[in-house]
Image (cartoon, rainbow, N blue to C red):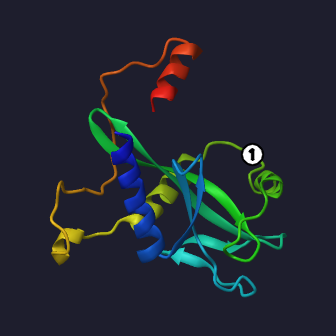
Amino acid sequence: MDLVKSLLHGLITYYATEVAGTETDERQNGRVTVFYMSLSDPESREKATVDGRWLAKNADGHDVVRHRAVEVSVKHLSGQFFYAFMPKQEFTQDGSTLVTSEYKEQLVDDFSKSRYPQNDRTRKNIKTWGDVLNPGESVVAYKTISAVRELEFRQVDGIQTDCRPPEDSSERADHIEKL
């Protein structure tokens, strides 16, 4: 299962960096990757946008670039593998080099004063990143490789699993170790 997760993770990372032109930052020993759009000229008032929604722009009141990033991991649920997207904020010094974690904490506090969940904004960020990272066509169409199994890229509205939440923290820790 770990091999399949690694292969799927590698596929989306390759596509994101080589085709979609995003920057990446790997965390948790490569199990989670954060994707963000670079800003080629942070001195200008340019924004990196997709379908009219900005993904990178100069931060107001700070000498950094603010990114609507997404953290991508691979999950295995009910016998199927899924890409899990979690919206994040990232900040870079020059449009592509990340700031230190201490400075990032200060910037996140400045830009997220209320910390209230904003489900509609979160949903729009996930949809936008889904559009960026969706290859829209299969590599099999180019007859470069034969398909072992076809991959489908679509948003999942609901998942039904045959498992229950852990009863206590020790059972939760056991589950996490197995992942």
The quadrant of the picture occupied by the N terminus is: top left
Q: Secondary structure at mark 1?
A: loop
Residue at the image point whose x is 54% and y is 55% from the top: 33
Q: Position of residue 165 (x, y in %)?
A: 45, 19
Q: Which residue is mark 1?
A: 114
Q: Is residue 61 above or below residue 2?
A: below
**Identity of the residue drawn at 20% across and 74% down:** 144
Q: Amino acid at mark 1?
A: Ser
Q: Quadrant of residue 173?
A: top right
Number of numbered markers: 1
Q: Is residue 132 visible?
A: no
Residue 110 placement (x, y as % from top left): 81, 55
Q: Quadrant of residue 132?
A: bottom left
* Extreme residue toward the top, this view: 167
- Where does the image place residue 30, in percent across and percent down from the top left? 54, 51
Vertical placement of residue 31 versus 44, above or below: above
- The quarter of the picture where the C terminus appears is top left
Would residue 63 be found to the left or right of residue 44 on screen?
A: right
Position of residue 48 in the picture relative to residue 116 (left or right): left
Q: How many C-alpha atoms fall within 10 Å of the one at disc 1: few (<14), some, or many (≥20)?
A: few
- Judged from this view, the residue extending furthest toward the front is 3
